Amino acid sequence: MASIYLSYRPGDTDAVAGRLHDHLIERFGRDAVSWREPGSLVATDAGLRDAVVVLALIGPRWLRAAGADVSPLAEPEDPVRSELEAAFQRQLPVIPMLTQSAAMPQAPYLPPTLRPLTSLTPLPLRNDPDFRRDLEQLIKTLESYVAPLAITRGVQRLSRQAFALLAAAALLVIALSVTGVFVVARAGFGQVSAPTVATPTATPIIPRTPTLVTVAQDPLSALRDYGGDAPTTWATDVFGQCSFASGGYQVVGSSKPEHSALCGGPKALAAGNERISVTTRLATDNTPQGVYGVYFRAGDSASTTGYAFVITPSGTWKLLDAKTGQALGSGSSSAIHTGSGAVNTLTVDADGALITLYVNTARVGQITDSSYASGQSGFLAEHGLTVVYTSFILQRYE
């Protein structure tokens, strides 16, 4: 039976894992939920064998226990590592669940086999009073992979009288079929074989999950040559608006109103259906009107077409049409870290016309627009803001 596999680290999320396990069994049935039994420190393949989706519970001690010098993930035999490696190898959907205010682990702290985890969008699983609300959101996601138990129970609730009626009807059909055979035989049409009744087989329908292929995972600490058409590296200029400085890739916005510093990425990274994730550090906070962020699907490095996902030092966001300057969506979010020195991770998930925007793993907006299908990506800043970009991850949907 298709199952949900629950991965957790003992000593990190034991209580939350047990509570979640019980709720999932209640909603989907015991046979639809599997995990490594509490107390077991040995990874097992049995639970993953029938899994169609994997939940990765991540708490504050998932990456490193208190007082430990080395992460347990450094050991190839670590059960959590083995479980997630198997999930990625089998291309199973993995849903990270952040508990107890934990943050997503960063790629440098993970073995290469687990770094695909950093590109996934996690769901929260907070303590009460938010637990129930987060649980319902998770269950809605899981229902696209596994049918809830209520559907099965609905079939099992047929009464004995209903079964009796069905049986009687089946016998009547068989009797009429046999009579028909005799009538045909006596009418001189020769021998007629008994009809073959095919028994339908239920086949679970699992929705296709688009595959993300990592094209670039750049820490933006030095010039890199991606190959392909020129330019093959991140833009730099003599004016210092686009340069490698301050521990990353630094973009210095012009002090002129509404005049952006645009720093284009390599043409080799042009994409259409994609997920882009960038980490920023706001070095200066000169004006609350300043914006900074990432542009994508641009027709050229000057971003005269395409989209721009930008945030402000005061905690607001916009998705802009770069050609018209029109805001296709906007709002404010407490997920945006504000003020000078603020660090934010911006993620754009552009799959066809559907564009979903995240800041620090929290979804802030979703817009449908088909004006631009593909193009280049890069960074921007304006109104005198200085922003240091410290990572860039580009994945394409296959």
Image (spheres, grey):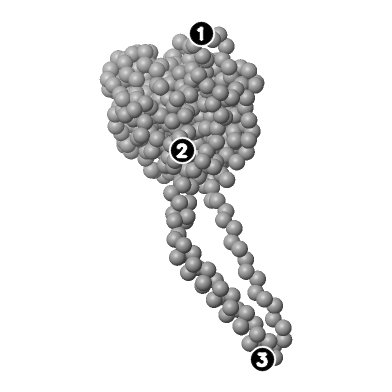
Viewer-nearest of discs 1 and 3 = 3
Instruction: Say what amino acid the circle numbered 3 marks.
Output: Ala
- For image coordinates 29% across by 29% down, the residue present is 332
Of all residues shown, which one is farthest toward the bottom? 187
* Residue 369 at x, y percent in the picture: 39, 43
Q: What element carries label 1?
A: loop
Count of marks placed on residues: 3
Q: Is mark 3 on a helix, strand or loop?
A: loop
The residue closer to the viewer here, 236 or 392, is: 392
Q: Does label 2 or label 3 sit earlier along the sequence?
A: 2
Q: Does label 1 or label 2 sit earlier along the sequence?
A: 2
The answer to which image quadrant residue 39 occupies is: top right
Identify the residue under disc 1: 67
Quadrant (top left, top right, bottom left, bottom right) of the N terminus? top right
The answer to which image quadrant residue 233 occupies is: top right
Residue 5 - label: none
Identify the residue under disc 3: 187
Task: Mark yes or no: residue 178 visible.
Answer: yes
* Residue 354 at x, y percent in the picture: 42, 42
Viewer-nearest of discs 1 and 2 = 2
Quadrant (top left, top right, bottom left, bottom right) of the C terminus? top right
Instruction: Say what amino acid the circle numbered 1 marks.
Output: Gly
Q: Do the residues labelled 2 and 3 touch (CB within 8 Å)?
A: no
Pointer 1: residues within 10 angstroms few (<14), some, or many (20+)? Answer: few
Tell me how far mark 2 sits from mark 3, CA to CA: 61 Å
